[in-house]
Amino acid sequence: MQRLFSSIYKEFLVLIRDRAGLAILFIMPLVLILIMTLIQDASFRSVKEVNIAMILVNNDNDSLGQAITEGLYESEFFQIVEKIDGKKITEIQAKELVATGDYKIGIIIPERATDAIRGNVNALINKSFKSFKVPGVKKRTRKSTIDVTIYIDPATSQSFKNSVMSSLKEFTSQLEIEMFFKNFSEALAQLMPDQKPIKFESFETIKYEEVYASTTQDEIMPNSVQHNVPAWTMFAMFFIVLPLAGNIIKERDDGSAFRLKTMPGSFVTIMFSKIFVFLGVAFLQFILMLLVGVYIMPLMGLPQLEIGPHKIALGVMAIASGLAATGYGVALGTIATTHEQAATFGAVSIIIFAALGGIWVPVYVMPHTIRIISQFSPLHWGLNGFYDIFLRGGDLVVVLAETAKLLLFFVFMLLIAIVYNNYNKTK
């Protein structure tokens, strides 16, 4: 036990003497989490809050053009641009402005678009009253179509495009229903003199209520901070692998490791002293990340991090994640023979773990094969555990599975290091 305490003290002294390295361990993750949260904040806000500029060219000047124009303005989703320098934008100009990336989307409503809708409505009415001659309704049975052109910047996301298309279809379908009801009512009034035309009234029978499911009584509102703090905390904690592996290799290169082996004790004692110190660094990183989410991010116009009531579960997940990271660092430092090997393999493997773990792209949108592979990423286990706490209100029991996986990963990495070290001894 005395040897373990002495080794821990030695590792602590080595760590605090490298002030530049220590500063990087704490400052870089904080900068990373702030930048990534600021960048991704817009994707968690509604389109209305982002207020994206859109070009609108209304050549219809009738009911359809008016309905789309009013609907876009009233929705407040977009900043509608119809003129530039006081001149109405043409279709050619709209295409060029979107193609150059000045605007994300441009909508062109063609001439006589409303006439096409009226013709289709008349066709339906004629079909409904084919045995009668309805005064005032043109005899027409063929349906016609007209194209509303939408120019889209190739850099625009698919989800944004779908949102715009959904809004436009809602405006046009509402107009078609209203126009059909009006003409149908007038046709009935022509056939039955006692029947007066009924005025169309739109009403909402079915309302949709969004409730974010949670295991607690408090509804948790997902936002950029709730998603990014746990995600990038896991990413930063695993980057502790690089200095830990570098520390092991440095001791081996300068002869410190050989001198330690000549003293009473075992390889496991030396490794656990490193694990203990770097686990403390990882846990301190985690605490700083939480403090940034609670106190610093609101000052930058971002939502405040809601830690929730299950702080014990949060602490257990942080320790399990830190152990998984330090265990991986010990295994890498034991196996790698040079700093270059450890740095290159360590950095690339962590990025791969992060990509598979859902740090950048949610796992549920990945292809089926990749989703299966992602189940073996330690960052995926840690991220799921933190999401259970931050977003789903989960307690310690809920995160036991993820905690167990991280601890097993730590034990497995430690066993690899021990077996490889013993193998080298026999060579």
Image (cartoon, grey):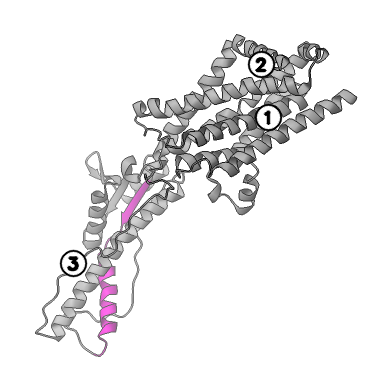
Mark 2 secondary-structure assignment: helix
In the image, farthest residue toward the front: 1
Q: Nearer the viewer, mark 3 or mark 1?
A: 1
Q: Is residue 8 left or right of residue 237?
A: right
Q: Which residues are magenta?
A: 105-131
Q: CA distance from mark 1 to mark 2?
A: 16 Å
Give amino acid for label 3: Glu
Q: Is residue 250 visible?
A: yes
- Residue 356 sits in which quadrant? top right
- Quadrant of residue 295 in the image? top left
176 in magenta: no
State whether residue 2 is above or below residue 97: above
Query: Taking 242 as reference, is 293 left or right?
Result: left
Dot 2 amino acid type:
Ile
Residue identifier under label 3: 201
Name the element at disc 3: loop
User: In the rendered view of the protein, which quadrant contains the N terminus?
Assistant: top right
Residue at 11%, 78% in the rendered image: 196
- Residue at numbered disc 1: 327
Answer few, some or many: residues within 10 Å of disc 1's Cα (few below 14, many 20 plus, some between 14 and 19): many
The disc, 3 or 2, on the residue closer to the chain's N-terminal end is: 2
Between 178 and 376, the one lying in front of the other is 376
Residue pictured at 16% horizontal, 77% vertical = 186
